[in-house]
Image (cartoon, grey):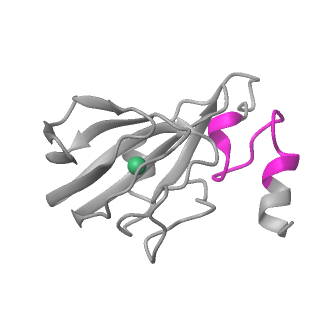
Amino acid sequence: MNPEKEGREKGRGKEAGEGEGEGRGRNESGLPPRISLEEKLSLFEDLWAPRIVAECNGQHIKLAKIRGEFVWHSHAEEDELFLVLKGRLRMEFRDGVVELGPGEMCVVPRGMEHRPVAEEEVHLCLIEPAGTVNTGDAGGPLTLEDPSWV
Ligand code: NI
């Protein structure tokens, strides 16, 4: 286990330190921390590289910035919720397209092939079971096995 990961696991359920992993900890007052999605989004720029901001009942809540076309893929075991925070997302399915603007969301059922496409940069919130791999069954260079916290 790498030191960074070990540190996160040790921190689980305890008082959160600054930065990484605060979404599942408590603040100095013993309260769950307020998490600003806007602030979290300002902390990274890379595209197609989701960051985890919180964990809830085994689901990871992630933020992502995307632009362009992702790969066609599906997730055999996981439903995947996409909530658009900024921009317009085209979620392509084999049988059609669902377009989403800010404040709109879509749950992609497990097993259904999909491809996110963003002509301009889109900011997303994703909710999916911890361990869900972004490229699903497709693999390839955009695969991110172990997303980091922000
Ligand atoms: Ni997916």
| 108 lies above or below 71 | above
At horizontal 88% and vertical 48% (from top left) the residue drawn is 10
Q: Is residue 69 left or right of residue 146?
A: left
Inspect the magenta stretch and tell me whether residue 12 lies in it: yes
Q: Looking at the image, can residue 36 be seen?
A: no
Left or right position of 131 against 95? right
Q: Is residue 142 above or below residue 88?
A: below
Residue 120, given in percent of the width and then of the height, sits at 13, 60
Front position in the image: 140 or 38? 140
Q: Quadrant of residue 141?
A: bottom left
Segment tinted magenta in the rendering? 8-24
Estimate the x, y position of residue 62 in percent, counting from the top left.
48, 45
| Image quadrant containing the C terminus | bottom right
Magenta-colored segment: predominant secondary structure: loop
Total labels: the figure holds 0
Tell me if I can see residue 103 in this picture: yes
Q: Residue at x 37, y 67 (%)?
A: 45
Q: Which of the 4 image quadrants contains residue 146?
A: bottom right
Q: Position of 90 compared to 78: left or right?
A: left
Residue drawn 26% across the image and 39% down it: 84
Q: Is residue 142 left or right of residue 118?
A: right
